[in-house]
């Protein structure tokens, strides 16, 4: 039998091993949290970059009002290191006010730096508004471009509430206050008021396209019926200036504005606030890292679905229904 001294020595060795693996596990957790934070926040907006470079600005996902991105664009305009800007666009659009804000910020940027847009995959609706803020648009031959138009969408759950026995009391100062209501009957007068709102913003969008793309009335009417076009057709309709890839966009900067083609390209990113949905994205990333692909897919799906939940209202977005 082992002596008491040997048993005590064995226990101490086990404790040391457990302590070692606890330390390794804790270090791995800290490393994972740092990686998640980096993945969510990105490396910052490169505002401290001193060496000359071309700034890449990515416009992706759903466009909404984004104060931090506007601040980033202002810093790019002020940076002495930035010699030119390439907008890398892959977005279906978003809210009308978000697209307007982005357009105005990009036009202000274009007053200070040459700006070229490259349509990587999609520049539809509000994202096309961003594209026409540039001085030149390059698109892939099969990129999706256009969807010039606006819409208003809001769910109506009146029938659902009736079916489950819930009634809503609404007292309004005037008939059109907060109308149409998602819980009330669809009122034709309220629908007509919203139609006027949609029409007004559509006219604004059309006039913007006509001005920026130098289109006459007939050419504008031909492209402003809400449909999307692939890059090859968009070129013939004067919605884009050239077909190609990002290298072609950069070549235009070199040719048209004498920007050194050998300059490095740096992707600028705005600093981001943390939110519950950021934590959801972090959880999805960790699940994917440790091999739980199914859980990761569900979590990523929830964060993507969040964007559609937030988009009730006046939109400049291309939303093909892929679920039916």
Image (tube, helix red, strand yellow):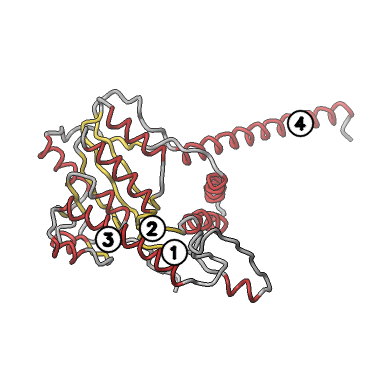
Q: CA distance from mark 2 to mark 1?
A: 8 Å
Dot 1 or dot 3: first in sequence order is 3
Q: CA distance from mark 2 to mark 4?
A: 62 Å
Q: Are marks 2 and 4 in contact (CB under 8 Å)?
A: no
Dot 2 or dot 3: first in sequence order is 3
Q: Nearer the viewer, residue 195 or 272?
A: 195
How many residues crowd around disc 2 within 10 Å: few (fewer than 14), some, or many (20 or more)?
many
Q: CA distance from mark 1 to mark 3?
A: 17 Å
Question: Label 3's element?
Answer: loop
**Residue lying farthest to the front in this orientation:** 174
Question: Label 1's element?
Answer: strand
Disc 1 designates what residue?
153
Q: Which mark is residue 148?
A: 3
Task: Residue at 57%, 56% (x, y): give it.
Answer: 295
In this rendering, is residue 132 above or below 79?
below
Task: Residue at 43%, 68% (x, y): give it.
Answer: 191
Q: Nearer the viewer, residue 306 or 200?
A: 200
Disc 2 designates what residue?
315
Dot 1 or dot 4: first in sequence order is 4
How many residues crowd around disc 1 within 10 Å: few (fewer than 14), some, or many (20 or more)?
few
Disc 4 designates what residue?
15
Q: Nearer the viewer, mark 1 or mark 4?
A: 1
Q: CA distance from mark 3 to mark 4?
A: 68 Å
């Amino acid at each position: 039998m082992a002596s008491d001294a040997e048993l005590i020595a064995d226990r101490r060795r086990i404790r040391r091993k457990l302590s070692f693996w606890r330390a390794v596990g804790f270090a791995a957790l800290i490393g994972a949290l740092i990686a998640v934070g980096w993945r969510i926040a990105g490396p910052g907006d490169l505002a401290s970059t001193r060496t000359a470079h071309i700034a890449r600005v990515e416009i992706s996902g759903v466009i909404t009002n984004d104060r931090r991105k506007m601040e980033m664009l202002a810093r790019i305009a002020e940076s002495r290191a930035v010699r030119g800007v390439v907008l890398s666009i892959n977005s279906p659009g978003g809210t009308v006010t978000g697209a307007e804000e982005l357009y105005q910020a990009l036009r202000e940027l274009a007053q200070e730096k040459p700006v070229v847009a490259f349509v990587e995959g999609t520049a539809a609706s509000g994202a096309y508004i961003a594209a026409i803020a540039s001085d030149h648009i390059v698109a892939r031959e099969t990129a999706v471009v256009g969807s010039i138009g606006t819409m208003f969408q809001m769910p109506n759950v009146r029938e659902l509430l009736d079916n489950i026995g819930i009634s809503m009391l609404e007292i309004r100062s005037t008939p059109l206050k907060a109308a149409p209501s998602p819980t009330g009957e669809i009122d034709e007068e309220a629908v007509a008021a919203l139609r006027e709102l949609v029409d007004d913003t559509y006219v604004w969008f059309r006039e913007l396209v006509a001005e920026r793309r130098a289109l006459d009335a007939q050419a504008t009417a031909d492209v402003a019926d809400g449909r999307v076009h692939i890059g090859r057709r968009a070129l013939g309709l004067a919605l884009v200036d050239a077909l190609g890839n990002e290298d072609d966009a950069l070549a235009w900067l070199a040719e048209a504005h004498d920007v050194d083609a050998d300059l490095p390209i740096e992707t600028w990113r705005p600093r981001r606030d943390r939110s519950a949905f950021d934590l959801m994205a972090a959880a999805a990333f960790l699940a994917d890292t440790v091999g739980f692909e199914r859980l990761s897919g569900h979590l990523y799906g929830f964060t993507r679905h969040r964007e559609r939940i937030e988009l009730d209202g006046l939109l400049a977005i291309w939303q093909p229904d892929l679920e039916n």
